[in-house]
């Protein structure tokens, strides 16, 4: 049963290690999910296993079929995001789970963005007519399904955004995925979610997450 107020139409752009488990959680919660792929025919087995609330389409098709869009492709995929998909996100809530990640010369995980620029703010600039919320970024992808099903709501999931209504909706979708939402504030305060940030790439209870992100002592 969904924790959000109604059934949503959600487009998941990128049906890989992040998009698949989150999409599965949302289908199980009763939402209608369209998985976007450059080769949607390869998702036939996935959508068939999830039932009639799951579909596959091109990126642009998934955006057009949805009210909420999850960006779950590798960060390098931003360069190849079709213009039609970008244009179609105008007026929609976009959840950004992409991570601009690299290893430093010392072997540390770091963001590839300029100092002081968060990925959430970058996405808001890339999609100025969409409402961007940053979420599903800091939990290791191999744990998204197991922890969201076997230990529902025990683990925290941080999120950030500038629009309170969009954040409320995304918080519901975080709960639908089996995690407890922890609000970090606006997009400019979302650095802890990014590669090299205080909570990346780790799992915490909601209380420990708040402490790690500097929200509580």
Image (cartoon, rainbow, N blue to C red):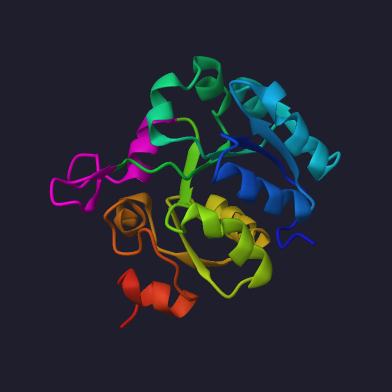
Q: Residue at x 68, y 65 (%)?
A: 149
Q: x, y percentage for residue 91?
A: 56, 32
Q: Which residues are magenta?
A: 102-128
User: Is any atom of residue 215 visible in this view?
Assistant: no
Q: Report the residue that reaches farthest toward the right.
A: 52
Q: x, y percentage for residue 156?
A: 50, 69
Q: Is residue 89 left or right of residue 116?
A: right
Q: Is residue 42 left or right of residue 138?
A: right
Q: Report the residue that reaches farthest toward the left.
A: 105
Q: Residue at x 48, y 67 (%)?
A: 182
Confirm whether the magenta stretch covers residue 15: no
Asked where in the image residue 203 lies, by quadrant, the reply is bottom left
Q: Quadrant of the C terminus?
A: bottom left
Q: x, y percentage for residue 126?
A: 38, 29
In the image shown, does 143 or 91 lie closer to the viewer? 143
In the image shown, does 81 or 108 lie closer to the viewer? 108
User: Is any atom of residue 27 visible in this view?
Assistant: yes
In the image, residue 33 above or below residue 65? below
The total of numbered circles placed on residues is 0
Q: Residue at x 66, y 34 (%)?
A: 35
Q: Residue at x 74, y 57 (%)?
A: 5
Q: Is residue 44 left or right of residue 204?
A: right
In the image, residue 61 above or below residue 92? above
Q: x, y percentage for residue 50?
A: 79, 44
Asked where in the image residue 68 lies, by quadrant, the reply is top right
Q: Quadrant of the N terminus?
A: bottom right
Q: Report the residue that reaches farthest toward the bottom.
A: 217
């Amino acid at each position: 049963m969904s924790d959000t107020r109604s059934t949503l139409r959600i487009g998941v752009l990128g049906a890989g290690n992040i998009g698949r488990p989150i999409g599965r959680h949302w289908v199980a919660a009763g939402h209608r999910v369209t998985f976007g792929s450059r080769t949607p025919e390869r998702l036939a087995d996935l959508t068939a296993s999830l039932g009639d609330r799951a579909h596959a389409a091109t990126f642009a098709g998934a955006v057009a079929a949805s009210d909420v869009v999850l960006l779950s492709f590798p960060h390098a995929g931003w360069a190849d995001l079709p213009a039609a998909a970008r244009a179609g996100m105008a007026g929609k809530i976009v959840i950004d789970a992409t991570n601009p990640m690299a290893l430093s010369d010392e072997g540390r995980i770091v963001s590839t963005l300029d100092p002081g620029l968060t990925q959430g703010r970058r996405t808001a600039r890339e999609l100025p007519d969409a409402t961007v919320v940053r979420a599903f970024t800091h939990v290791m992808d191999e744990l998204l399904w197991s922890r969201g099903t076997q230990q529902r709501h025990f683990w925290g999931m941080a999120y950030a955004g500038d629009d309170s209504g969009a954040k409320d909706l995304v918080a519901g979708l975080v709960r639908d995925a089996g995690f407890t939402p922890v609000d970090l504030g606006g997009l400019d305060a979302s650095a802890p979610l990014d590669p090299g940030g205080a909570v990346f790439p780790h799992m915490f209870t909601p209380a420990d997450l708040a402490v790690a992100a500097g929200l509580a002592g």
